[in-house]
Amino acid sequence: MLFKLTKESEVLLQDRVRTARMIGSDKTLVLHGGGNTSVKGEIIDHTGKRVKALFVKGSGSDLATIDENGFTALRLDDLLRASSIEQMTDLEMTEYFKDSMVAPDQPSPSVETFLHAFVPFEFVDHSHADYILAITNTDLTIDNILDILGRDILIMDYVPPGFPLAKEFMKLANNYNLSDYKGVVLRKHGLITWGKTAQESLDRHLEIVNRAKNEINKRFNGMGKLELEKDKIDNIITNLPKIRGKLSSKKRKILNVDLKPEIIWFSTLPEAEEFQSLGPATPDMIIRTKFEYVYANSIEELPEKIEKYAARYEEDYKEFINGKYPMHDPYPNVIIIKGLGMITSSTNKKEAKIISELMEHSIYVNLAAKSFGKNKFISKKEGFEMEYWSLEEAKFSKIRRQEFEGYVGVVTGAASGIGKSTFIKLYENGIIPVGLDLDLKILDLSKSLGNYSMGIVCDITKENEVTEAFNRIVLEYGGLDIVFNNAGYLHPAKIEEITLDDLMKHINVNSIGTFLITREAFKIMKAQNIGGNFVFNITKNLTNPGAGMLSYGSSKAFAAQVAKYVMIEGGPYKIRSNIINPDKIFKDSKIWEGGVLENRAKTKGMTVEEYKKSNLLKIEVLPEHVANVVIALIKDDTFGATTGAMIPVDGGII
Ligand SMILES: [Zn+2]
């Protein structure tokens, strides 16, 4: 850092952090990085000079968890000089901020930095409180609102955020003595309060929000609750893959199904249909929720409605944005189905869940607003302008899309060996990994990875457990894109020693288990109709059988035939099916445990070390070798034209 805080500023900032966090931790006030706060103080710059500074929330911070480093320091006098400038583009504003920052290594400051600077008080708090929005997103007159919220506040009509909002505030500051007021209500946006101390500004904030809340509680009973019936969940699961397929027409999507009793209740109201073109609670949500959502009377009519939405979106884009920025994905991010709840979608699970939460608050706000008369939000044109706001566009153009964003991959036998290694590789490649295993360790493994990965304890030889596992996957993500059939059972025995029980065990795991997984996953991929990838771990035994492996080899030969049929019947749906044949992979492997490895080495007359490297390349083949081949196989730019291939990963065997 190129500056020092004065002793006074240190205290001010600590106080700033304390109340900012209080605002941030109340979800009725701000959500997911929304809202911003500031304090004015002094710093000592690199020349030793005391300089007036504005400390304002920097981008990338969340008020709930912000600390002193989350506030960016700017030269206050530089910012105040901008009040005489008539117009400024977003880009010019960003440059102006950069030039006014005290230290260039701090995060770029909030887009509302000018507004914070222009408020002539030490502490400023800005939130998007649900209760305030419920009153401002209506056709109430200014007088009506003042009657509810008190005459000690000011009201501003909707102005887009950034410099226009700050300029509009300046007009207000010139016409009123701000000392006589506690804050400003920004219509269709939120609330700003100020104070000489952090506590004063916070108290005023909560007081005004409470006035709104009390009035709403008199008129609106709040959200009702309705439980979803069990057979309806089955209906959702049956239809989700098709919906995911439609939503993924341009980019793979991860879905989130919101079945909260409040959402089910709302979905049965006439307002669920009425609000579809109203917009969310605040303009800054539009980048995530889009302006409109899809409402459907039944889940069956969704595919058609989704297509219609996309076509209309393209028309709206042409009308309102007209090539100024590249068109976003035209498919809806929010869907509400009568009696069945809400589906949100994004290229990752975290975003899909955030969108759901933004919508929950928007639904509350819009219903509460309706109790005052008519709902009124910004126009569709203004909504599109927010969705394509240049500052956000600049951010997006910097983010490089990951190749496998929006992909879900299932690995069987994922708790150890090749399966575990592939499970982790999928994760490292940005794919949401789902691991199936009999071993409970799969739960800890998926937890340790995070990124909404899932571990399922599942016996793949049991039809009901496999179906249940795929139902869970569909309900959680909407579908899947990759299957690595890896789970296997191996117990070497000579022909005359093979018991029927042991042969059946091989057949159950290696043949039936692989079949059941394949059948359920195939159904989902076919319904999605966006392609998919199967990779089968068959092992070299198929092409190069070794003595004592009849049970293993023959049961794997069945699985190899399953792979062939996926190739044949999946082809028309762009479902690819390929086989990998690893050999002698011992690291972290369960099938070689319990003396199997030592016995095999002895049978071949080798030491364990010799046996491990008994291939042409004289190397130990590792699980990572296999995992990397799986990743290569599912990449469309390498193997996109390959199906029905069989790739050895064995160090070379003749
Ligand atoms: Zn705001």
Image (cartoon, helix red, strand yellow):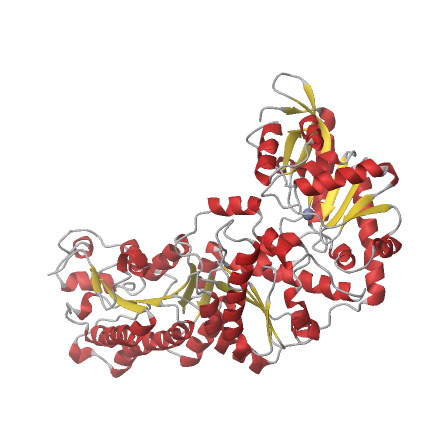
Q: Depth check: 572 or 85 in front?
A: 85
Q: Residue at x 50, y 48 (%)?
A: 396
**Residue 237 seen by the camera:** yes
Quadrant location, the C terminus: bottom left
Q: Residue at x 61, y 63 (%)?
A: 292
Query: Where is residue 271 drawn, in percent x and y?
Result: 70, 71
Query: Where is residue 444 drawn, in percent x and y?
Result: 47, 59
Task: Indicate whether 327 appears above or below 409.
Answer: above
Task: Indicate whether 52 appears above or below 472.
Answer: above
Query: Where is residue 363 drawn, in percent x and y?
Result: 69, 65
Q: Quadrant of residue 139?
A: bottom right
Q: Depth check: 205 or 598 in front?
A: 205
Task: Indicate whether 49 appears above or below 205.
Answer: above
Q: Quadrant of residue 424?
A: bottom left
Query: Where is residue 296 drawn, in percent x and y?
Result: 59, 75
**Residue 485 seen by the camera:** no
Q: Residue at x 66, y 60 (%)?
A: 280
Disc tally is 0
Q: Residue at x 79, y 58 (%)?
A: 135
Quadrant location, the N terminus: top right
Residue furthest to the left: 654
